[in-house]
Image: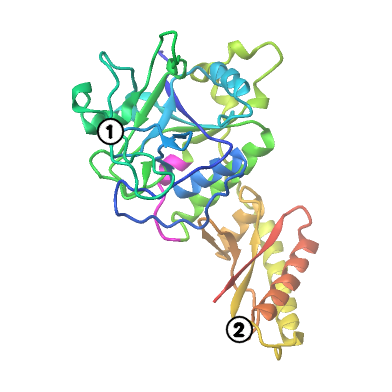
């Protein structure tokens, strides 16, 4: 049977963004990326947002995407080629982290291969921006070039002559732009439910096995939540059919040229786990939660709330989404899951005071009790101002 072909969207190691000028729509997310965030943070942010954000691919302070629409860029490179290409640009903007989508589904969504070069001369007509750095916005090709505005996002400059050599054809690039303004998000929706574009499979590529587990935990969290904390719904079917590939599990010295994403056995691609919780574990969890709630109530009563403080909430969270402990919490209906926040343990009595420091003291006491009962489970605190 013929293998399914994937296109890869490599993530960048540094972030450069401008407001989405292609529409007046707003998109709210829980946090922004810093310019020096690691590539794995970019991957996690894309999954949490549910979409691959369209961009303008700046180079030398000029957008390299032509036309009025930002674009998402993917590559048809074999996996081994991407690894070698990223290594050659290690100090630049490409890394060996990527999101893969099926080529036929990307095409159905409107994605197309780029157009390398023109049959005639390169001509532009654009108006310089009235503010620094005064580059032309948007960059548009002259009508004489023969490419309509709706298709100009696909254009990549090319010059194989001796002067000013330009050749990006080795990237085997595909692009997508929301030319019909159909999507509510500023990019191509991948894990979002209520969008006109839907995908049946996705692959996330990371470097390390430890990173793969971290990504799987995030996917499991979003699957269990069903919605982001800002209430946009996720496509749970696709989340459950998203596989993660850690390159260190397959890359061996001297074997890079043997790596083809389409040929990898399914056993190499990890899926998140949903373990069952035994009746005995559920009973133990109930006992621990009762003790934790009592400790929280005592800590809240002993905390000094006479000092002025902001109002807020503090909750104990579980940082192991794929654990049997979480499964037990679901079975006991003692957990709420918020996409982008995590697994919040329910019904822990943190007292009646609204002072954040009191809430934090109570939640901290509860967490210490839970750690004593379940030392192998990772717990955390989530606090917020009210």
Q: Secondary structure at mark 2?
A: loop
What residue is shown at x 29% (from left), y 35% (from top)?
Answer: 67
Q: Secondary structure at mark 1?
A: loop
Horizontal arrangement in the rendering, residue 316 relative to residue 6 (left or right):
right
Position of residue 275 relative to residue 171, above or below, is: below
User: Label 2 vs label 1: CA separation?
Assistant: 56 Å
Q: Quadrant of the C terminus?
A: bottom right
Residue 13 in view in this figure: yes
Q: Give percent across and percent down for residue 144.
A: 19, 23
Using the image, tell me which numbered label, if any, was put on residue 354: 2
Residue 118: which quarter of the image? top left
Q: Nearer the viewer, residue 379 or 30?
A: 30
- How many marks are shown on the rendered structure? 2
Q: Main secondary structure of the magenta part?
A: loop
Q: Earlier in the sequence, mark 2 or mark 1?
A: 1
Q: Residues within 10 Å of mark 1 (few under 14, many from 20)?
A: many
Which region of the structure is painted magenta? Answer: 230-239
What's the colour scheme?
rainbow
What residue is shown at x 54% (from left), y 51% (from top)?
Answer: 221
Residue 231 part of the magenta-drawn span: yes
What residue is shown at x 69% (from left), y 61% (from top)?
Answer: 380
Horizontal arrangement in the rendering, residue 90 relative to residue 141 (left or right):
right
Residue 139 part of the magenta-drawn span: no
Residue 356: which quarter of the image? bottom right
What residue is shown at x 56% (from left), y 47% (from top)?
Answer: 218
Q: Give percent across and percent down for residue 237.
A: 41, 42
Q: In this figure, which residue is indicated by the disc labeled 1?
A: 140
Q: Give percent across and percent down for residue 337.
A: 53, 59
């Amino acid at each position: 049977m013929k293998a399914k072909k994937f296109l890869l969207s490599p993530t960048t190691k540094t972030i450069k963004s401008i407001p989405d000028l292609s529409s007046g729509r707003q998109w709210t997310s829980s946090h922004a990326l810093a310019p020096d965030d690691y590539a794995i943070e970019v991957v996690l942010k894309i999954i949490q947002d549910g979409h691959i954000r369209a961009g303008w691919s700046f180079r030398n302070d000029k957008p390299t995407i032509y036309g009025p629409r930002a674009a998402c860029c993917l590559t048809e490179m074999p996996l081994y080629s991407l690894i070698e290409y990223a290594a050659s640009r290690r100090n630049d903007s490409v890394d060996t982290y990527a999101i893969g989508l099926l080529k036929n589904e990307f095409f159905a969504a409107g994605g197309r291969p780029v157009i390398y070069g023109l049959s005639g001369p390169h001509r532009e007509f654009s108006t310089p921006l009235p503010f620094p750095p005064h580059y032309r916005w948007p960059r548009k090709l002259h009508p004489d070039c023969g490419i309509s505005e709706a298709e100009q996002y696909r254009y990549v400059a090319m010059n194989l002559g001796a002067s000013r050599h330009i050749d990006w054809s080795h990237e085997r690039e595909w692009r997508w732009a929301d030319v019909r303004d159909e999507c509510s998000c500023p990019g191509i929706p991948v894990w979002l439910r209520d969008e006109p574009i839907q995908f049946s499979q996705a692959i996330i590529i990371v470097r390390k096995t430890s990173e793969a587990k971290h990504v799987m935990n995030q996917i499991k969290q979003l699957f269990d939540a069903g919605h982001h904390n800002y209430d946009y719904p996720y496509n749970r079917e696709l989340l459950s059919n998203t596989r993660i590939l850690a390159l260190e599990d397959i890359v061996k010295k001297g074997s890079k040229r043997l790596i083809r994403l389409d040929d990898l056995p399914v056993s190499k691609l990890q899926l998140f786990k949903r373990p069952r919780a035994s009746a005995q574990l559920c009973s133990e969890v109930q006992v621990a939660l009762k003790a934790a709630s009592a400790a929280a109530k005592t800590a809240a009563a002993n905390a000094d709330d006479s000092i002025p403080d902001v109002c807020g909430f503090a909750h104990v969270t579980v940082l192991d989404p794929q654990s049997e402990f979480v499964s037990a919490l679901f079975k006991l209906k003692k957990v709420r899951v918020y996409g982008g926040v995590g697994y919040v343990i329910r019904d822990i009595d943190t007292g009646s005071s609204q002072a954040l420091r009191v809430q934090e003291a109570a939640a901290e006491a509860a967490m210490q009790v839970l750690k004593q009962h379940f030392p192998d489970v990772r717990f955390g605190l989530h606090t917020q101002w009210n």
